[in-house]
Image (spheres, grey):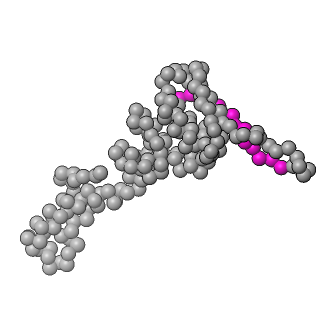
Amino acid sequence: MRGAVESLPTQHPLGLQLPPIYHEDSLIQRFTSGLDEALAPVFNALDNLDAYLDPAVAPPDFLEWLASWVGAAMDETWSLERRRSMVGQAAELYGIRGTVRGMRDHLALFVDGEVDIEETGGAAWSPTPGGAVPGAVMPNLRVRIRVPDPGGIDARRLEAVVAASKPANVPHQIEVVSR
């Protein structure tokens, strides 16, 4: 949460917003200057709202809040730049959620390695009635991740990412192997 910043000047002094008859009244000007000091952080945040909503430049503590807005799950151990990248790509990733490309792109943000996905689903058509049905009878998804150090992967977090990225009710297996 943004707090009061000591000696932050305001671009919108309240005393000057009053009718001109109050501009010379020292009591009114001192009173409104106290309000100016309390409201300066609010005006400053509103004047720079576009910067707060841009993950590339948002303050680090506000970035966590932005991540919650777009449902981006981040790892606390990530660098600030990696967290910014995740929040910046979250909307695009949700647009392709449930697809092989969407899952691959989502997993690529979480692991520093190669992501291979095999799935049994498919869609096709046949001009002949009663033709073969595409895909397998039972849907299945196999995720293989190749990383330099398989022991450095948090299996619980990886499981959560796959579960959130895949189509609902499709069973999956995850395999983490060394490059």
Q: Is residue 79 left or right of residue 8?
A: right
The answer to which quarter of the image holds residue 25 is bottom left
Q: Position of residue 145 (x, y in %)?
A: 59, 28
Q: Nearer the viewer, residue 130 or 175?
A: 130
Residue 77 in sight here: yes
Q: Measuring 53% from the left and 29% from the top, which residue is drawn there?
A: 112
Q: Is residue 177 above or below residue 2?
A: above
Q: Nearer the viewer, residue 109 or 163?
A: 163
Q: Position of residue 96 (x, y in %)?
A: 61, 48
Q: Measuring 53% from the left and 35% from the top, which residue is drawn there?
A: 159
The answer to which quarter of the image holds residue 12 is bottom left
From this viewpoint, which residue is outermost toward the front?
Answer: 138
Q: Position of residue 91 (x, y in %)?
A: 53, 50
- Position of the C terminus, as image quadrant, is top right
Q: Measuring 65% from the left and 33% from the top, which residue is drawn there?
A: 142
Q: Is residue 179 magenta?
A: no
Residue 115 in sight here: no
From this viewpoint, which residue is outermost toward the left?
Answer: 27
The answer to which quarter of the image holds residue 100 is top right
Q: Nearer the viewer, residue 122 or 102?
A: 122
Q: Position of residue 70 (x, y in %)?
A: 47, 51
Q: Is residue 171 left or right of residue 70?
A: right
Residue extent of the magenta highlight? 112-125
Q: Measuring 24% from the left and 52% from the top, which residue is drawn there?
A: 3
